Image (tube, grey):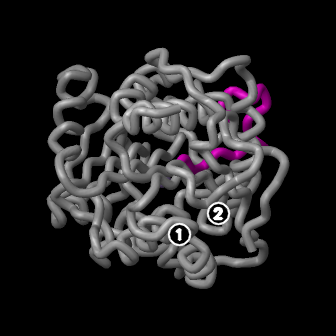
Amino acid sequence: MLKPQSLKLAGADDTPDPRSPIVVWGLPTSAGGGTGRLGAENGPDELRRASHGWNSLRTSSGYPFGGGGAISDLGNLNLDGLAGLPLMERIERHCPVAGWERFLLSLGGDHSISYAVVKALAQSSGQAPGLIYFDAHPDTVDMVDGNRYSHAAVLRRLVDEGWVDPARTLLIGIRVPEAEEVVYLASRQLAVITPFDILEKGFGHVWSAIQQRINGAPLYLSLDLDVIDAGEVPGVENPEPAGLSSRELLYLVDKLAPHLWGADIVELSAECDPAGITAKTAARLAIDIVGGKLQGLGGG
Ligand SMILES: [Mn+2]
């Protein structure tokens, strides 16, 4: 069901081994979207392709890595024709990492995939992670057109079903919540940092809020590319103005990466990315995540 392929994330070993400290897989679907532009099903391969745009691999803060068998890209899971609950169940069933025993980077796909991945990891370990959620949207509507597993409902499902720890959850970059989402976020006391908060309080404030959630239990990063300003990333399903710059996001992700236990990068829609800039930005984020994690593990 998992199709190994010749196109791999830069730095990944030629021969994938699911027991590697860092495991990468692609979840090519746009079935959880549908409120805007599509194309997220090509996201995993477009990100992989863009990751080969540099001659040598180093994180944004300069840590060099690559080779040595530490990173395995297992390919894409076939999700053709699936939507809603059956789509989630397919992802959960084939999740290549049990518990938090090794680092899993999932390449979306629209944001709905995060529900299935986080649920699979939390369920198999019995440990609900803290969650750093970079997104323009809080993804906490109850359902979209009857779909409870829409990309706009993913965080609400994770919180309500207990697959993440709400006290260790932090939303960053939120700027266009729906009315029902404002009510929901307050009712669950979920912490939100908006781009205007960042403007007023600076990045020291954001980093200390992140640091409060690093301690102890597992910490998961879910990274919706639309957290970045629409002017920098046209290739997402729902681009929004007034977002973070890629420089700001890479700064935070580079610092955060060594502390992570799992991550995803979602919503890359190559069809709306004529100059390939969104794919290149997504690739840099992936490089900072796996490179920073390797640095944290003391290898590479
Ligand atoms: Mn999202």
Label 1–label 2 contact, CB within 8 A: yes
> What's the mark number on residue 34?
2
Q: Residues within 10 Å of mark 1 (few under 14, many from 20)?
A: many
Residue behind mark 1: 150
Q: Residue at x 22, y 44 (%)?
A: 214
| Magenta extent | 265-279
Q: Is residue 269 magenta?
A: yes
The answer to whether residue 257 is visible is no
> Mark 1 and mark 2: span between their CA atoms?
9 Å
Q: Residue at x 37, y 77 (%)?
A: 123
Image spot of residue 53 (x, y percent): 74, 23
Q: Quadrant of the N terminus?
A: bottom right
| Up/down of 142 relative to 230, above or below | below
Residue at the spot x=49%, y=62% of the render?
114
Q: What secondary structure is found at the residue carrying circle 1?
A: loop
The type of residue carrying mark 1 is Ser
| Most distant residue in the right direction | 6
The three-letter code of the residue at mark 2 reads Gly
Instruction: Decide if residue 123 is in sight here.
Output: yes
Circle 2 crowding by C-alpha within 10 Å: few under 14, some 14–19, many from 20: some
Q: Is residue 157 left or right of residue 27?
A: left
Compare residues 118 and 203 and report the one nearer the observer: 118
Say if 36 sits above or below 235 in the image: below
In magenta segment, residue 38: no
Q: Looking at the image, is 219 positioned above or below residue 278?
A: below
